[in-house]
Structure formats: C-alpha cells, structure tokens
Amino acid sequence: MAETLLTPVISKLFQLLAEEAKLFKGVRREVRSLTDELDLINCFLKDAEAKSQKTDMSESLKTWLKQIRELADQIENVMDEYVLNVSHHRNNQRGFTGFLQKTAHLIKGMKPGIRIAHEIQSIKSSLLEIKLRGETYGLRPLEPRSLMSTTSTTTNVEVHDLRVGSLFLDDSELVGIDSTRNELVRRLVEGESTRMVFSIVGEGGIGKTTLAKKVYDNEQVKERFDCHVWVTVSQSYNMVKLLTRIATQIRHTVGETHMVLEELIDIVRQYLLSKRYVFVFDDVWDIDFWAVMKHALPSNNKGSRIIITTRNDIIAASCKETSYDLVRKLKPFSQEMAWELFTKIGFRSEIDHHCPPELQKLSLEIVRKCQGLPLVIATVAGLLSTKEKVVFEWQKLHDSLTSELVNNPRLSSVAKILSLSYNDLPYHLKSCFLYFCIFPEDFWINNKLLHRLWIAEGFIKEERHKKLEQVAEEYLNEFIYRNLVQTWTKNNAPNYKMYRVHDLMREIILSRADEISFCRVWDERNSKYGGKCRRLSIHSGTQNVLKTVEDYRVRSIFLFDIDNLTSSTILFKKFKLLKVLHISSVPLGNLPKGVGNLVHMKYLSLRNTNVKKLPRSIGKLHNLQTLDLRNTYIREIPVEINKLQKLQHLFASFSGNKIKYGADADSICGVRLHGKVGCLKHLRTLRIVEAHDSWVGDIKELEELRHLRSLGISNLTTQIGRVLCASIEKMNNLERLNLYSISEDEILDLQHISSPPPFLGQLLLMGQLQKLPHWILKLQNLSRLTLNFSKFIDDPLKHLKCLPNLVSLKLYQAYDGEQLHFEEGSFPKLKMLDLGKLDGLKLVRIDGGELPLVEELFIGPSPLLEEVPSHIQLLRNLKLLKFCNMPREFVLAMQPVEGRDYWKIKHVPSVHFWYRIEGEGYKSYKLGESDLLELLNQ
C-alpha cells in the first residue's frame, strides 16, 4: 500500500495500543476509533496526493492537504504528551512512597485521561469535516495506482514548454559537447547491424536533451536512417497516446481512433520491420516504459538505433539488454567548461566574450555557485547578459543567487525542471530527502549519520529480513540512482560515504520544507522565526534564537556553530517532546539534569562541545538510540547509562591531551564506563572506551554484546589485551575494531585469537606488536588496515599481501627494516597506500605490474630513502602522489632528467611534495622542474 503523510501517525497509534496495555479505558476506545477513522481518510489522501503529482495543485486542494497535515501533527502531539505524562508517573513510583504516589495518580490521572479522550473526539470531528470537504473536491477513496497508471490523460504542458529551449540551442552556445556528440553519432551510423539502445543519464539540467537533439539532428544521422522519430515522454505519459502519436507520425494515418495497446504495438512494429529507424525517447521516468515500448521496435537487423534520456540510473541500466547497448552518464561541467559557457552567454555582446577585469572575481564565484549544471549556468548568464556590466548588479545577484533561482520569474523555470525529480519521489523517500535542507549549504553529510537520524525520526520502515540500517542505505542509493545527490567516497574508507545536494536543489527543498512545516532554518539570510514547525535548524546566532521559538512541540533541533550557548537549560525546559538534539561545534558548557525529562529522545549529539559531565538523569532516556559524545571533555559516563536498553550507538572520546604517541601522532583517549555494560544488549557501536585496571574483571561483559558492529578501546595494557582476545572471538558481527595501547612502547598482546570475527572489514591497531597477529591473515573481508607503532623487524608485506579485499593500507612507524617489497600478485584491490615515518626505510621495490589499482600513494617522512620506488611509472591508476619531509637526496633523484624511466610518473594528475619550513608550517610543491629547484635552494 502506498504511503501518505498519515501513514506514520497511524503506525504510531497502533504502536501505542500495543505498548500501553494500561491505557485509560476511555482513551483506548478513542484511540481505536481514531485509528479506524484515519485509515478511511487515508484513502482520500492517496487520491489527493496522486492528483497533485499529475497537475498543478489547486489552492483548495493545497488547503485541504494543509488541514490534514495539521491534524496529523495534532494527533502526534496528543499521543506524545500522553506518553510523557505516563512516563513521569512511572519514574516517581518507587517503594512504599511510590505506592502512595501511584494511588494518588489513579485519582489525579483521571483528568488527563478525560482531557485526552476529549481532544481525540475533537480531532475526529475535524476529520469528519475534512473528509466531507474532500468529497466536494471530487476526491474518492481509491488506491493511487489506479489513478497514476499509464492510462492517465494529463500532461504537464508548462514543463514541456520549459524544455523547449534545450531543443533549439545554437551551436555557438554549446560547450564540452563535441566529443560526446561525435562518439554517439559514430556509434549510431557505424557498428553492428543489430538494434542498439543508447541511454543518456544524469541529473536534471545536466544537458541530456540538448545532447540527444544535437545527435538526432546530425546530417550523418539524417542520411543514415529511413525513419526518424522524436518522442517526449515525461512523468505523466500515456502509453496508448504515445503509440498513437508514433503511428500517426510514421504512417500519417492510423485508421481506428480507439485502439488497444496491443493493436498499436503491432501496427508500429509491422511498419518498422522493413525500416532502418532511429528513435529518441526524451525524459523517461518510469522503469516499465521500455519493458512495453521495446515490443513495438523490432530488432530487424538493419542497424536501427534508439536513444533514451533519463535522470534515473536504474532506468538506464534496464534498457541495456546486449553488450552493444551503451549507457552514457553525463557529469557536471568542470570549472573551466563552466566558465567558457558562462562567458559565451553572459558576455555574448563583448569581443571574444571578454569578461571585464572588475567583474571577473564575482563572475567566477557565481559560476562556482552553479556547481557545474549547464542549465543553471546558461540561465544565470542569460539574465546577467541583460544587465548593466557593473559590480553592483553582479554583487546583488551573487548574494541572493539560490533564492533568485527559485523566486525570480525569469529564472524559476530552472527550479521547476529540477523540482520534477523531487515530485517523482515516493512519499516515504520525500521526508528523507527533505532532511538534506537541515544541514548548512555545501555541508557533506556522512551516510552513517543520515542512517541514525532517519531511524530516530521514524522515517525508515522495517522490512522483512532487513536491518533498519540496510533499508536506510537502500533509500540513499535510490537518491544516487535518481541523480539527486552528490557523493564522495575516500579510497581509504570505502564504507564511509559523504552526501550533499546541489545548492539549488537545497533551495527547492528548503522552500518545500518551510511550506509544509517540516523544518525552519535560521541562518544569515533568515533572521526571523515564524509559525509552527517540526524541526528547527540554527546555523548561526545565539541562544536567543531558541527564546523566540513559541512552538514547544518542536521534535528536532540542530545547532551548528552557535557562538554563544553556555547553558542548554532552555532546550530541556521548553522543548519537552524532543526526539532529536544535534549540537555540533557549539561552546556548550554543561548539560542540566533536566535532560532526563525528555523521554521521547532517540538521538542526542554533543559532539565538539565543552560539556564536562553527563548528569545521572541520562538513565531516564529509555528511548535513546544514539549518544554521541565525541571530542567533549566528558571523562566518565555514569553507571545509569546501563539502563538504556534501546541504546544502539555510543560514541565518545575525550578532548583533553592524555596519551601521546610521539610528537606527530594524534592523542587517543576514550571515556570510562562503569558497571555491567553487558546489559546493553542492542548496542551496535561502542567507541572509544578507556580500559583501566578495575575493568579487567568486567571485560568479559563485552561478550554479551552480540549485536556489536564497531568497537574501540584505548589505554590497553599487555594484560588487558590478552584478556580481551576471548571477548573479541565471540563478537561474530563485528565489522570495525580500533585498539590503542596505553603508550607507543606498550606491547599489544593480541595473539590469542584463533577465530576472528568473520565480517571484520576495518582494523586499526596502535601499539607495539612484536609480530603480526596470525589471525589477521584470516580476515577475508578486511578492506582497511592501519598499523601504527607496530615496530616490526620483518617486512610485514610478505604476510599482508594475501589479504584479497584490502583497499587501504596505512603503516606509521610500523616497520624498522630497510626494505619493503611489493611482490608479484600482491594487493590486487589496494587503492590507497600510506607509508609514514618509516625511519629505517632505504628501498621500496614494486615489482612490474603490481599494485594495479592504487590511486593514492603517500610516502614520508623517511630520512634514509634516497630512491624513488621502483616501477612507480607503471602505476597507471595513480591520481595522487605525496612525499612528506623527504631528504635532499630524494628530491634530487626526482629531478626531470632525461632517461630516467620513473619520471614517467608525470602522467599522475597530482604529484606533491609536502615540505616543512620552520615557523611557516607545511608547504606544497607540485612536481615540476622549477618547483623542485625552488625547493632545493631553500
């Protein structure tokens, strides 16, 4: 069944009925009745939301949906306040005094029960009025599939009109299209005689339609094919009408005007059997489109070709049926290409499209804000071409560019085209996508953070045989397939992915979030708070912002870089229904005991704050799933933490300097846990906790954490490490393990593991090892390995080379020998190699053809290394090469002297020396003769 905005509210009512068996009788009866009423009105809502997807929504329908949304919020408020009252009663019931209080509450509790029952009755009356009003708007209680099927007759004429400009661009206004166009033309007119499908895929505004039209209009293509057809499909296509148009276009007459789908397919197919045809299907949104349309386009062995443009990677992949078919993904313009397009259009009246010097800096910044989208660049440049070429006009547009693109009538067509991607999302994905507007502009968001926040908000629905995190990852992947988000993944952290949305898309969803009261953002542009909202995100300002917020029913608050928030009392007194509190890089000094009153809290982050102590009332947060205390001044966590049976993620690290591993190493310091942590049965992340002498007896408690995925322990001694081995063996679900010794000279005794966790993918060991633990070689799923201060005498590579899935390898002061040898057949999947501070290293040998996938190579400081690693020129995938604090002899060896084969590393896009100059920090030198001479002469 399709979801609507009422779906989570109905689920919450069912959950309340299931969990609160002792609901007041009147309340239970009213909750059941309300649930039934919402189920009925939900069907009307599906009809309304389905219709709103196909056409511009009428004002009356907008008002109707707004009323539904407000009532849904009201229902949630009533339920949450009820649970809050019940929780307070339970927390106060202890011993004989508790018995007396319980008796008193049975009497006093009648009033809130009666009040809640009355509120629900009032909500039901409002729902009845809304349902009757919906019927007057022509809404029917039907499933949306019947309304959204391909028999729909509605098309979005306005959006089609907005796309027309892409079809008739002059060649003089095109940039970076020649090579791709020429390749596609060649593939169309040459090659196999079998039918081929070429899919052009990319985000909205990337230039798919423009490219397809230039290929379609090419003279070679016109001469090659007997039959040419261009079809704009769009979101609300009608397959019968499309085939009727095609049949009319190719035959000029169809005959009967009312024909079924199968008859039309047969007519088109029979006509094309003897033709060499080329078809373009522009703007395909439905994965079922090609599954039907392909039957009308015969593979007649005459060299016919089909081009499909789409925003969805899955649709493009589904059209690829043979090895001859092609998927071409378009990427955003580079800064150079974007500048060329901008000057061509913005300064079309100037000689050689010259940008005046006084406008160059502003123009470059405007181009950067367009983030490589040709549609945005061309539209903005077109507007600026009509304005006076003065700094004032340029500056005005620069300062308000994203909001102008949404609100300026001359630019809003861009926003409407990009909005189609948001509108096409299923309802359950829309809330997740709106979440991107909560974070500051250009903010990269970690995938794991998004998972935890979405789960805390209740956006992720359980699916059979899948964990919530897996479902959340699938949601993120859906955004990638639809080309709605930008992604970034580090080679040394393949599971650590970062996401953000294009600035313009962020502006679009920010407007939508404000419209439906999903979230209000307070930043340098928005300095006033108004109206109700479910979430509040503050990117600048002080705690005075919170004082102006009147709606105490705010569910989530995000604070980023607030300059003055010494006390958080207002958060816990005013916002009693908070589920999510994310405080990042804020000078917060203390956390009041009132935090324990927030019984709905599921996610609490105090990361990068000055908080020094957790109150014992933290143990009252029985719904808490995530507690993030990283980079705070909290040294100990109270024993009450063990009451949090739903806690899944505990992140902690102490900001103070306690443990030092040499002058250049990071400080590592965890926090102390007390008591029996084994009772936290649902814990999946425990990082970083500090080992201490009194903890040795409790270390076996870790064996009880059977769901643990990530574990980090600092301050390990040889004895504790030896005891820890037995617990690690039983952590069958462990995926990440970070272990830090108490000092760089302390031996980590980890030899006593015979069967390591089978799914372990990330391993960091910091401390002296004497020899490589044998069990590491059994880790078939290990992708990231970091060994610091291991101080091996024998070359560790001769053992590590057998790890089949290793992607990242870091060795820092891990080896005291003179030679490292990358032998033939070693490290087949390695992409990132970091060899840091190997003081005894004199030679690095890379057998020819080895390390085939390495993209990043970092070396240094290594004071005795005088030669470039052998065969480095054969690392053809190398993209980044850095040498840090290398000796003068090594720099001399790198000079571009003719005949030195290793100088062929000049194919690497980025080769840097990092060289430390006393008093000036690090300097970077790109590899080149003049830079090397400058470096040598210092």
Image (spheres, rainbow, N blue to C red):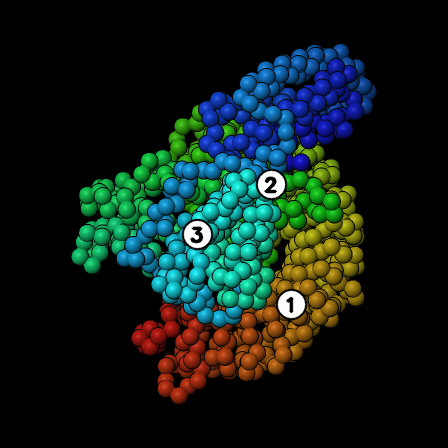
Q: Residue at x 20, y 59 (%)?
A: 352
Residue visible at 71% across and 59% down in the picture:
759
Residue 28 visible in the shown view: yes
Three-letter amino acid code at disc 1? Answer: Asn
* Residue at the (44%, 27%) spot, across then down: 529
Q: Which x, y percent locates residue 433?
A: 53, 41
Q: Which numbered disc covers residue 526?
A: none
| Contact? badges 1 and 2 (CB < 8 Å) | no
Does 64 appear above or below 235? above
Which mark, by number, is residue 454? 2
Q: Are marks 3 and 1 in contact (CB under 8 Å)?
A: no
Q: What is the distance, in whole Å, between disc 3 and disc 1 at their CAs? A: 47 Å
Q: Which residue is mark 1?
A: 805
Vertical placement of residue 754 versus 673, above or below: below
Is residue 536 at least partly visible in the picture? no
Who comes first in sequence, dot 2 or dot 3? 3
Q: CA distance from mark 1 to mark 2?
A: 30 Å
Amino acid carrying mark 3 in the image: Trp
* The N terminus, quarter of image: top right
How many numbered marks does the figure carry?
A: 3
* Nearest to N terminus: mark 1 or mark 2: 2
User: Which one is closest to the eye, mark 3 or mark 1?
Assistant: 3
Spot occupied by residue 95 in the image (x, y as percentages of width and height): 81, 23
- Residue 424 is situated, as x and y percent measured from the top left of the image, at 52, 41
Q: Are marks 2 and 3 in contact (CB under 8 Å)?
A: no
Kindly report the distance in space between the C-alpha atoms of the residues bearing marks 2 and 3.
42 Å
Residue found at the very far left of the displayed protein = 351
- Identify which amino acid the numbered label 2 is placed on: Trp
Question: Residue at left 45%, top 29%?
Answer: 545
* Residue behind mark 3: 230
